[in-house]
Image (cartoon, rainbow, N blue to C red):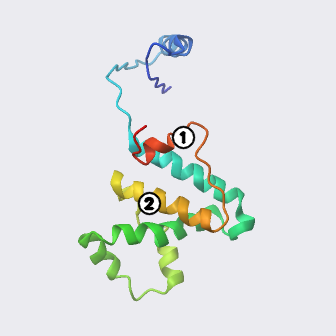
Amino acid sequence: MNFEAKLSMNTNMGKVKFALYQAIRDDNPHVMIIKPYKKDRRAIQNRLMWHWYKELEQQSDRHGMSKDDLVCYNKYHIGVPILARDPEFSEVWDSMRFLSYEQKLKAMKFIPVTSIMNIKQMTEFLTDFKTYWNQKGCELTTSQDLYFAEALGIKK
């Protein structure tokens, strides 16, 4: 059993107590770690990106692509240009210039793009992602408490 909770004055202690009770009832030993909370903007950015992929998948009538195709398309058209500014990535990417467009898109299934981006690069990726798909007539929401402002580093 894995359980993680952010503790504050507003925490629902019932869930915490239940998790502790479940751990005590289990015959296996458990570890409880309490440490200061630090927001992980990387996780917030990833959650927003995958939320948008889900929304795009639901709007497939507007673009005609599956979720897997969308991931490859965005990695190639939005992510690669951002990463190509890095000389090391650019050198690797340039070695693929002999591939056709279709082959490069297929290669995106195996080449890490967003997972190797730093927070600044991922912020740019998300901004460009939203702009691109909104211009294509797809609606990408930022609701559902997805920390849109935090994901893009916008100060409130």
Indicate whether 127 appears above or below 63.
above
Disc nearer the start of the sequence (2/1): 2
Q: Nearer the viewer, residue 35 or 110?
A: 35
> Residue at label 2?
125
Total label count?
A: 2
x and y percentages locating residue 100 in the rendered image? 49, 87
Residue located 55% across and 13% down the image: 18
x and y percentages locating residue 74 in the rendered image? 52, 67
Q: Quadrant of residue 114?
A: bottom left
Residue located 59% across and 56% down the image: 53
x and y percentages locating residue 12 in the rendered image? 54, 14
User: Amino acid under label 2?
Assistant: Phe
Residue lying at the far front of the rendered structure: 156
Indicate whether 9 appears above or below 147.
above
Give neighbour class at mark 1: few <14, some 14-19, many 20+ (Cα, 10 Å). some
Q: Quadrant of residue 95?
A: bottom left
Give the quarter of the figure containing the C terminus. Answer: top left
Residue located 36% across and 58% down the image: 121
User: Amino acid under label 1?
Assistant: Leu
Helix, strand or loop status at disc 2: helix
> Residue at label 1?
146
- In the rendered structure, find residue 72 and report the number of the disc placed on it: none
Q: Nearer the viewer, residue 65 or 129?
A: 129
Horizontal arrangement in the rendering, residue 148 relative to residue 116 (left or right): right
Helix, strand or loop status at disc 1: loop
Residue lying at the far left of the rendered structure: 87
